[in-house]
Amino acid sequence: MPSAVQENLVSKNKQYASNFTEGSLALPPAKKYAVVTCMDARIDPAAAYGISLGDAHVIRNAGGNAVDALRSLVISEQLLGTNEVVVLKHTGCGMLTFKNEDAHAVVEKNLGADAIRELAGLDFQPFPDLEKAVKSDVNFLKSSKAIPDSVTISGWVYEVETGKVRQVV
């Protein structure tokens, strides 16, 4: 039996598909850039960052983390022709609220020893300072041998309280 989430997905998709006219968009993003941003449900990258369907790759993960996004960025650039990366973290991010030890302790408490063994050594990559984390991710990408020097990389903060963005680097 489908869950309420699954029923909503089917219902809303039916509405969306009934007016869908963008099926002929090219595979590579038209504007040749990728955005790395957080998976936070309060962020709508298309609306907040002015991204139309087909414009850019939007890579989302916890914290808008560049290390986690590297695999997708290499595919985006090397196979699909993007030449710019925008790293966008945000105020009020959950990654600002804990340390690795805290996350591992919660997993152990809730899921037990087998789960904690599976995640042994995993860096959840929390960060205590938002702007430093943006700069660190931009520096990581700029120093990566997997990202060509010709790729433009910038770092931003999205303010969930106001909907505004500001450039950090």
Image (cartoon, grey):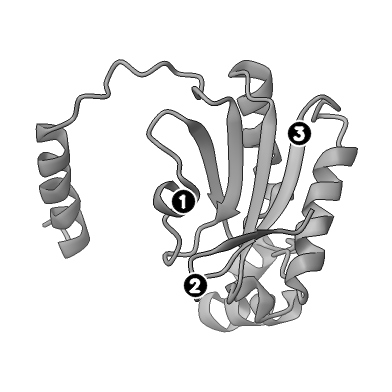
Q: Is residue 112 left or right of residue 54?
A: right
The three-letter amino acid code for the residue at tag 3 is: Thr
Q: Is residue 106 above or below residue 159?
A: below
Q: Residue at x 62, y 35 (%)?
A: 72
* Viewer-proximal residue among 120 and 59: 59
Q: Nearer the viewer, mark 2 or mark 3?
A: 2
- Residue 162: numbered disc: 2
Q: Secondary structure at mark 2?
A: loop
The three-letter amino acid code for the residue at tag 1 is: Pro
Of pointers 2 and 3, the one earlier in the residue sequence: 3
Q: Residue at x 70, y 39 (%)?
A: 70
Q: Secondary structure at mark 1?
A: helix
Identify residue for label 3.
152
- Residue 147: numbered disc: none
* Viewer-proximal residue among 160 and 36: 160
Q: Position of residue 18 (x, y in %)?
A: 9, 33
Q: Secondary structure at mark 3?
A: strand
Circles 3, 1 touching at the beta carbon (< 8 Å): no
Identify residue for label 1.
45
